[in-house]
Image (cartoon, helix red, strand yellow):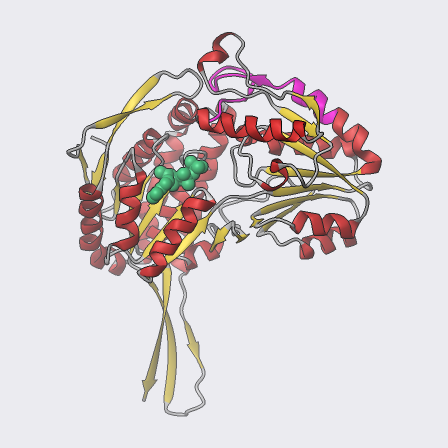
Amino acid sequence: MTHFIDGAWREGNNGSFDVFNPATGEAIGQAARGGRAEAEAAIAAAVRAFPLWSASTAYHRSALLYKAHRIMTERAEELARLMSTEQGKPLKAARNEVRYGADFLLWYAEEAKRIYGETIPSARADQRFMVYRQPVGVVAAITPWNYPVSMITRKLAPALAAGCTAVLKPAEATPLCAIKMFEILEEAGFPAGVVNLVTAEDPAEIGEVFTTHPDVAKLTFTGSTPVGRMLAAKAAGNMKRVSMELGGHAPFIVFDDCDPVHAAKGAGLVKFLNTGQACISPNRLFVHRSIAEPFIATLKARTEKMKIGSGLEDGVAIGPLVNEAAIAKIERQVNDALDKGAELVCGGSRATEGDLARGHFFAPTILAGVNEDMLIYREETFGPVAPVILFDNDEEVLERANDTHYGLAAYVYTRDISRAMKMTEGLRFGIVGVNDINPTAAAAPFGGMKNSGLGREGGHEGLDEYLETKLAGFSI
Ligand code: ADP
């Protein structure tokens, strides 16, 4: 019973599918195979719940979000362990994700009370303008497997704070984390129909319902650019609002005025975080030619020490990839780069020693001498490969960094304030980290330019995505 519809756990009519631990290949649970019927039932419940929920006070919605935050914090360890088992990331990283995910409940519990309107002076003495901010309506949400807990709260917390009701479909690889999150929301006491969960093995049928159903006002999606583009196109045909958090191809630029050892430590930490399975993962390390040697030597030494294994094992830094297709994509990009003249600094192949053979592991890899003819220079990798590209001057590196259809995150290492400002302003990316490898927080807007998406999550911008503006003109 893994669909949560209208305040009750439901079985559905299509049986269930197995969920696997990517580190061992073992089945660890099951989720119901939802389809059109479940999606429609969930939307109907959300429609019924909307009038009361949207009319409830911001203080009431805030109190429930605070309660959900408290329960999630109490269950943090349980959630983190489940996440390591189902998704594969090291336990420490899973704990960080739970904390980051819980932060959205807390932040939007606070922000719910600050959904302010506006009055506007009129040119007519007998007229008054008032601007209201009202919830958009029923929200359909689709979340990915790489951050299986925080992507749920990053969408649902602002939607609920705004007064929307919601239906969520999690990724087929990680429904168990979503189920646990919904148990928390259920315990927090959101009224029946306000939040609904439909699990599915085949996402396409539910995507079709979400993008065409007349009662869905807004689609919020996090996932790959091709799927996002397809869903946004369908949603546009039905004039639905959309938020799209899609792929990235982050440049990581290391200037010659910075400490190459410090920069290499940062690069290794952010590149191999979640085994490279993050949309803000650096996909091109641009290093100034004059400091390439110490940078690569430090990165190599640290990378070679990284322990590969199950996220639940002590000291593991590199967990499994999500599936075999991910391994195949990485192998294709690495082999293509090597065929075209890149140098293999370390790693380069899947890891199969001992128990690793049972899972989808790939050794953390550094490629030097990468150039624009290689697939990895353009394609998102979503895996533990750090491609190093040398550069000579600021104008050149800015132009090359921007030479991508993606525009999510970018990183710059420099001690020169004017260089830092020029790069920040010149980079066509939604998020820029300057000597900072973690430029994300519940309070800050997250999102991309170009093919990396539409809209922002987090911060007050994240709330705007769930609000309509209504103007009232009064003649007095
Ligand atoms: P990835 O390639 O990283 O797995 P996807 O974009 O395929 O990214 O998956 C992100 C989310 O999108 C998941 O919840 C997945 O089930 C969903 N998804 C994939 N294809 C479709 C589709 N045709 N319609 C709706 N959702 C989809």
User: What's the magenta region?
Assistant: 298-321
Residue 89 coordinates in the image, percent (x, y)? 48, 26
Q: Quadrant of the N terminus?
A: top left
| 29 to 419, vertically: above or below | above
| 413 to 61, vertically: above or below | above
Q: Residue furthest toward the right? A: 290
Count of labels in the image: 0
**In which quarter of the view is residue 336 placed?**
top right
Left or right of residue 94, residue 424 in this image: right
Q: Quadrant of the C terminus?
A: bottom left
Residue that appears at 27% across and 43% down = 205
Residue 350 coordinates in the image, percent (x, y)? 55, 19
Residue that appears at 56% across and 48% down = 408
Could you tell me if residue 54 is visible in this image? yes
Residue 33 coordinates in the image, percent (x, y)? 23, 33
Any magenta on residue 47?
Answer: no
**In which quarter of the view is residue 57 placed?**
bottom left
Q: Residue furthest toward the front? A: 339
Closer to us: 163 or 380: 380
Residue 311 coordinates in the image, percent (x, y)? 48, 20
Left or right of residue 174, residue 93 in this image: right
Quadrant containing ligand 1 reads: top left
Q: Residue furthest toward the left? A: 13
| 73 to 297, vertically: above or below | below
Q: Residue furthest toward the top? A: 354
Could you tell me if residue 60 is visible in this image? no
Any magenta on residue 311?
Answer: yes
Closer to us: 63 or 410: 410
